[in-house]
Image: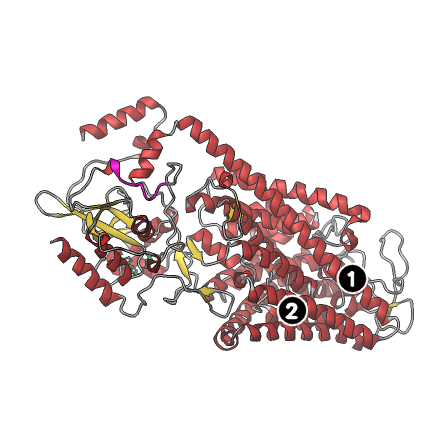
Amino acid sequence: MLSNHIQNGIETARLAWSRIPDSDEPQFADDGVGLLKKNDGSAVESLDYEVIENFAYREEQAHRRRKLYVSYLLVVKWFFALLIGIFTGFAAVFINISVENFAGWKYSLTFNIIQKSYVAGFFVYVSINLVLVYTSVYIVTQFSPAAAGSGIPEIKGYLNGVDTHGILLFRTLIGKVFGSIGSVGGGLALGKEGPLVHTGACIASLLGQGGSTKYHLNSRWFNVFKSDRDRRDLVTCGCAAGVAAAFRAPVGGVLFALEEVTSWWRSQLMWRVFFTSAIVAVVVRTAMGWCKSGKCGHFGSGGFIIWDVSDGQEDYSFAELFPMAIIGVIGGLLGALFNQLTLYITTWRRNHLHKKGNRVKIIEACLVSLLTSVISFGLPLLRKCSPCPEPDPTSGIECPRPPGMYGNYVNFYCSKDNEYNDLATIFFNTQDDAIRNLFSAKTINEYSSQSLLTFLVMFYGLAVVTFGTAVPAGQFVPGIMIGSTYGRLVGMFVVKYYRKLNIEEGTYALLGAASFLGGSMRMTVSLCVIMVEITNNLKLLPLIMLVLLISKAVGDAFNDGIYEEQARLRGIPLLESKPKYEMRNMIAKEACGSGRVVSFPRVVKVPDVFSILQSNTHNGFPVIDHTRSGDPLVIGLVLRSHLLVILQSKVDFQHSPLPSDPRSGGRSIRHDSGEFAKPVSSKGICLDDIHLTSEDLEMYIDLAPFLNPSPYIVPEDMSLTKVYNLFRQLGLRHLFVVPRPSRVLGLITRKDLLIEDAENVNTLELRATSV
Ligand code: ATP
């Protein structure tokens, strides 16, 4: 009977998985977009966010002194939240100081050289950019492929329950930090904000697992959290910390984590995330204060993106709402177009270019760098300079600038000293300075519509082409640049036609930036708060809300947000918040795989476990026992990862084919300290590492102590919509579908779950024993 059962399982698995290689070993290969693939073609595996309440877990829970342990865990969680905030804050400061200094040196040197020769200046500018971008792409391709891109789709996937290989490794963190310095410092049309979110997530994950074992940077003291569930909470804190650090927007960071990246949220988590963001804000502020005295080179003046427009437009009239709504529509259209174009280009790259290897990726990034340098240096040369405006001592803006200086009103290829080149002011400048100039309320008529239009078209094209190159890349800053350009253009027309109103072009630039981000990323609340925090102007809140709502609605009419599109392209199976409409007419049974279920009996022979695991790639298996009358009885779910640990450690092998006492089992998934191990990842162990002797092949394993005795089960005819909601809301990995149950043991209502004191618990236990 037993071996028949196993035979059936093996046979089923063979039939269903005949195309899948025998070994489960993750022989990862680069898929061309910086994502790593397993040898079975899938790049991802799900995470176990469900608590596996096996015997060892229950025993451990029973033995812990409850109150003391809960308090200890709470303190540790807050301590980790503090550490994540501090480390992410320092990482952000380091990236910003480095980027600003590299960019500052580059522009100072170039401006000094072009005083003598524009040709020499051009070569210096191109060469510095090329070296920085080459360094970035080299680090990414040779050392940490998972650091390419922004990382937000992968982190979103992680928090949705999908583990993309390599995204939270130590080397990914290093690649992200140094790669961003190279790519942003090298002047590419990308930003460092997305990578900072990924950096925060990596820091959180590494802290949660006690450091990096591979690089001997680990400590047992930090290795407190062993479940994917706890690590998920830490990674959420890391994401919020990344945004808080990138924009110096602590509240925006919390909301970004809530709105954009997480799939599950709890109020306790909200407090911790908020605390982490606040810590980041303090760390960054302290560092900024220290740097202001000139101790950080070029960092003091630029750096963290904060474009204070608190002295900008005070009020707005009803008549202005129409052009502002138009900005929202343009943002939605251009944002959706950006998502579509980047999707096409990334798909093409993935299928044709990046398959050819790392050399092609390096050449491609260098070519994009060359193109960016040629355009940003060359186009302003073609532009005629304009005379400086009347000096305004209150504005604090100098025109003309002293020779060799960059910033606002740049004197670039002008015949006279008191002239400036408006295109160079935005194109041949650091991104932060360019945005500051575009947002500036004090510089009315600084740009001609021709220059803004040229910049818009060229930068939009560059941002599309740069997206998907093998370097760390964020889309926030390019989005702000694009949006503020057309926003300012609209502002110029409004100034022209509504002469009587007190209108400032800078306000329109800000709304344009919000609209493009809304049209591309489709976030609303978090973006709105981020925009208010970075511009320090609360009065514009209703207007930002308006353009964001319009741009999101317009963008949604065409396609999904950029992160969802990219996640899909990278093969990350995200479960979105809403089930598909068609699911209403489907039932659970219809969604199950067509093959027969691969299951285990309670006591199973060692070689059978081995061969079943070898014959398929499933990660969860029902365990079936039999009632006295011989009917099959589902007694739980066992994970592949647990089976691999049991096979490798061999301590739970037994000679007898009869069930053992569960209290004696569960040794192999415990730590030396006696602590219950989290569902051990099978990534660390593969079947090839397991060597069974002829004696082992005669042994048995009783699976009862290792299985999760209470997996989630649904009746076969439950609507798929309900199944979807259950699966997503509980963060499940496996769900059993069973025939409609014949007996009802009892009913649980809300009142049964309101356990307030020990007495109630005892009553419940009493009831349970009487049942
Ligand atoms: P994940 O990929 O989310 O980590 P998993 O590896 O356990 O989970 P897969 O093997 O990827 O699941 O599932 C692929 C298909 O196989 C699904 O359609 C699922 O219904 C089916 N399947 C999963 N586990 C079993 C099993 N034990 N027996 C038979 N079919 C299974």
Image coordinates for residue 211, horizontal then vertical, percent? 52, 47
Label 1 Cα neighbours within 10 Å, binned few <14 / some 14-19 / many ≥20? some
The circle on residue 105 is 1
Q: Residue at coordinates 77% horizontally, 64% vertically from top-left?
A: 106
Instruction: Identify the image quadrant of the N terminus.
Output: bottom left
Answer with left or right where residue 716 lies relative to residue 344: left
Inspect the magenta stretch and tell me whether residue 322 lies in it.
no
Closer mark to the observer between disc 2 and disc 1: 2
Q: Name the residue type under label 2.
A: Tyr
Quick one: quadrant of the C terminus? top left
Q: Classify mark 2 as within 8 Å of ligand 1 or not, answering yes or no.
A: no
How far, Cα to Cα, is label 2 from label 1?
A: 18 Å
The amino acid on which the numbered mark 1 sits, given as a three-letter code, is Trp
Residue 601 appears in view: no
Q: Residues within 10 Å of mark 2 (few under 14, many from 20)?
A: many
- Which quadrant of the picture is home to ligand 1? bottom left
* Residue holding disc 2: 134
